[in-house]
Each structure stands twice: as structure tokens, then as C-alpha cells.
Image (tube, grey):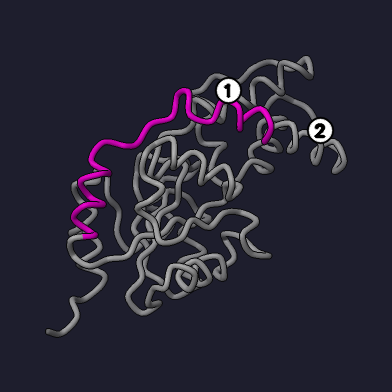
Amino acid sequence: MFDLDGTLAETAGDLIGTLNALLTREGLPELPLAEARDLIGAGAKALIARGFAVAGATLTPERHDQLFLDFIAHYGRHICEKSYLYPGLIEALDRLEAEGFRLAVCTNKVEGLAVDLLEKLGIAGRFAAICGRETFPFHKPDPRHITQTIARAGGDPARAVMVGDSRADIDAAKAAGVPVVAVTFGYTDTPVDQLGPDRVISDFAELVGAVEALVPRKAA
């Protein structure tokens, strides 16, 4: 299972672009991409709350809900203008599939947007399941987001691995009893090696080896 934003793809340009569009509309200063990148990772609602807090604004629950709808509408129109797959990802997916692994996505992105983005990036068809924030009545860091994604993909929980970039990914996987590989190039306000993942990689060339170290081969 893979997280999406900051794990499969670099999506900060489009996400922060949408956040800045809302901030500008509200008369607030835009946030520089380099500084705002690590606000991503827990879904759009959290990104809005974090972004507006950094910009010095407070939100009522009602205003937050409306901004979320506005965010989804704007982002949906600009979802893949600056986003791209990380180097080495396609080769890693090819190798995992060759080893017999089934692939899935478990993301806090809204499911429809996740599917749309993965289709535009050309890899949606590679996943047995694409499960988003509202696919189930719970989402990461709730471990059931992990376990239900495994079930929807027809996977084996005893042989599953989560690949992600944030505390939500790592905490959800650990609570689900699923080993987790953390990537260093995603979105997090705390270095991932301090969050207790089972393996840390800085390049997708390292992924297959990390997964094989965590999931023993089936007996012949």
C-alpha cells in the first residue's frame, strides 16, 4: 500500500497553489512553496487549517467546511498542472509486481481526486484498490483505513507493507500491525526516521529491498 501525496507523487505545487488561491481570495498573504510543503500530509481539511493558521487567521467550523468545498472545487480543476511521479517509482512498481505483490493506495486525499490524479499520472490501473479519506468512515491515522484497504484490494494482512511519508502513515500502520517503509522526500514536519518506521528509504531504487526485508518470501 502506498500513500499518494509525497510518496507516489510530488503534488505540493498544485496543493499549495490551491491553498494560496484561497488565502489570496480572503485577503491573506500567500505562503512560499518551500515553507508550506510540510503542511501537507493529513488531507485537505488539515492543510486548510494549518495554512490559515500560519497566515494568522482563525476559522470557525462553518467557515472551515466552506473553504474545504472551495478547495476541492479549485484543486479538481488544477489537479495535475505541476504534479509528477517521483523518479524510480515506475521501475519499483514493475519489480514489486514481478515479485507477485498486489498494489493499493491508502491516502487521506478525497477518493475521487486521488483516482483522477492517478489517472492523469498514468498509473491508476496498476492498483487493486484506491482508498481515500472518505472511502470508509475513518481515515489515517486510524488503523482501520489500512486494514480495510488491504481487504478491498484482496490482500493478505500478514504479508502487507505500508509505504508513506508522514506521521499519519506510520502511526496507522503500526497500530494495524503492518510494517511500514517511510520515504524521506515527502511531506512531514518531523524527520521520518524519528517517527519509528521499520525502514527508511531516500530513493525508490531501495524500495524492493526494504519490502523484501519486511515480508519473507512464501515457501515454494
Residue type marked 2 = Thr
Q: Residues within 10 Å of mark 2 (few under 14, many from 20)?
A: few
Q: Quadrant of the C terminus?
A: bottom left
Residue 109 falls left or right of residue 50: left
Q: Position of residue 146 (x, y in %)?
A: 50, 66
Residue wearing tag 1: 17
Q: Residue at x 40, y 54 (%)?
A: 2
Label 1, secondary structure: give it. Answer: helix
How many numbered marks appear? 2
Q: Residues within 10 Å of mark 1 (few under 14, many from 20)?
A: many
Residue ID for mark 2: 58
Which residue is at a point 26% across and 52% down the rendered structure image?
93
Percent across and percent down for residue 137 are 68, 65
Label 1 sits on what residue type? Gly
> Taking 182 as reference, is 45 left or right?
right
Q: Which residues are magenta?
A: 72-97
The residue positioned 71% from the left and 16% from the top of the image is 24
Task: Say which element carries label 2.
Answer: loop
Q: Earlier in the sequence, mark 1 or mark 2?
A: 1
